[in-house]
Amino acid sequence: MTASPFILETRGLTKAFGGLVAVNAVSIGFKEREAHAIIGPNGAGKSTFVNLLTGHLPPSGGEVLFKGANIAGLAAHKVTRLGIGRSYQKTNIFPSFSCFENCRLAAQSRLASSMRFFKPARSYRAVSEQAEAALTAAGLAARSGRIAGAMSYGEQRQLEIAMVLATAPDVLVLDEPLAGMGKEESELMVALLKDLARRYTLILIEHDMDAVFAIAQVLSVMVNGTLLESGPLDQIRASKAVQDAYLGDGAEAY
Ligand SMILES: Nc1ncnc2c1ncn2[C@@H]1O[C@H](COP(=O)(O)OP(=O)(O)OP(=O)(O)O)[C@@H](O)[C@H]1O
Ligand SMILES: [Mg+2]
């Protein structure tokens, strides 16, 4: 048997909410250091799909293989510790804490168990260094001491990325990182995500097609819970099925 080309892979992943099958037998492979966007209309099942990947929802069926091991149904904090970090469609920061403190809490969630054999001072230092490095990687080095709730919306969303980075993930799962952003904020975020895509495996849910085409190498299109098509950017752009179901004439989302 040959080794899987994927760091993360779903096989027949399914989630039913009562009679509604929100994710219906979806099989997608994510390659290491590839930026892979999941697109589709509202209610297509994109967020539910990533909630299944990250342990925020238990699947009704199917597998989630991370580095070859089936992690389907594993609790979210355990998935984080394995190296899959995620941000949320809605903001998820502690507004009264500083940027640094937000990142420190995130870093601690990953490092706590691995550092338990070390003296508290040493583990404190490691967690702090990881938090600072994450702020720098997210372009927020100069904002370390700022109270998160006092920053602009765009900076708060940058902070969410920093908090994911602080967990030292292999795979970054970002659910609509551009949602609600103005033009300038979006441009900054797209530049940040392009930079991160060089170093991480990136799974990106995004409605802004300009951003998707700028960041992702591979696209998966979901419609009504099912995977319509998955492949390189050009293949998806040229796909008649995708155009009919989703992209429309002008290749615009919605
Ligand atoms: N916890 C839940 N309980 C019941 N139904 C749910 C739940 N979460 C999602 N759904 C339903 O599952 C379907 C898929 O929702 P989901 O949020 O995954 O879509 P989405 O593709 O992320 O949409 P959007 O682009 O609007 O964020 C929708 O019909 C939604 O109402
Ligand atoms: Mg969603």
Image (cartoon, rainbow, N blue to C red):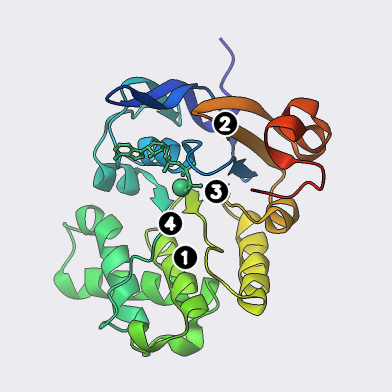
Question: Could you tell me if the residues under marks 3 and 4 are in contact, i.e. CB atoms within 8 Å?
Answer: yes
Whole-angstrom CA distance, mark 3 to mark 4, is 9 Å
In the rendering, at what x and y percent does residue 250 appear?
Answer: 81, 48
- Label 2–label 4 contact, CB within 8 A: no
**Mark 2 Cα shell of 10 Å, populated few (<14), some (14-19), many (≥20):** many
Q: Which residue is mark 2?
A: 223
Q: Is label 3 in a helix, a strand or a loop?
A: strand
**Mark 1–mark 3 contact, CB under 8 Å?**
no
Please tell me which of labels 3 and 2 falls first in the chain. Answer: 3
The dot on residue 161 is 1
Above or below for 21 versus 46: above
Dividing the picture into quadrants, the one containing residue 230 is: top right
What's the amino acid at mark 3? Ile
Instruction: Name the side, left or right, on which 233 lies relative to 196.
Output: right
Q: Which of the two discs, 1 and 3, labels the residue nearer the N terminus?
A: 1
- C-alpha separation, residue under disc 4 versus residue under disc 1: 12 Å
Query: Amino acid type of disc 4?
Result: Gln
Sequence-wise first label, 2 or 4: 4
Residue 89, how many percent across, how many down? 43, 56
Q: Look at label 2 and name its amino acid.
A: Val
**Disc 4 residue: CB within 8 Å of ligand 2:** yes
User: Residue at label 3?
Assistant: 205
Mark 3 to mark 2: distance in Å? 13 Å
Residue 248's disc is none
Residue highlighted by disc 4 = 89
* Rendering quarter of residue 228: top right
Please report the residue visible at 30 percent of the width from the left and 42 percent of the height from the top: 56
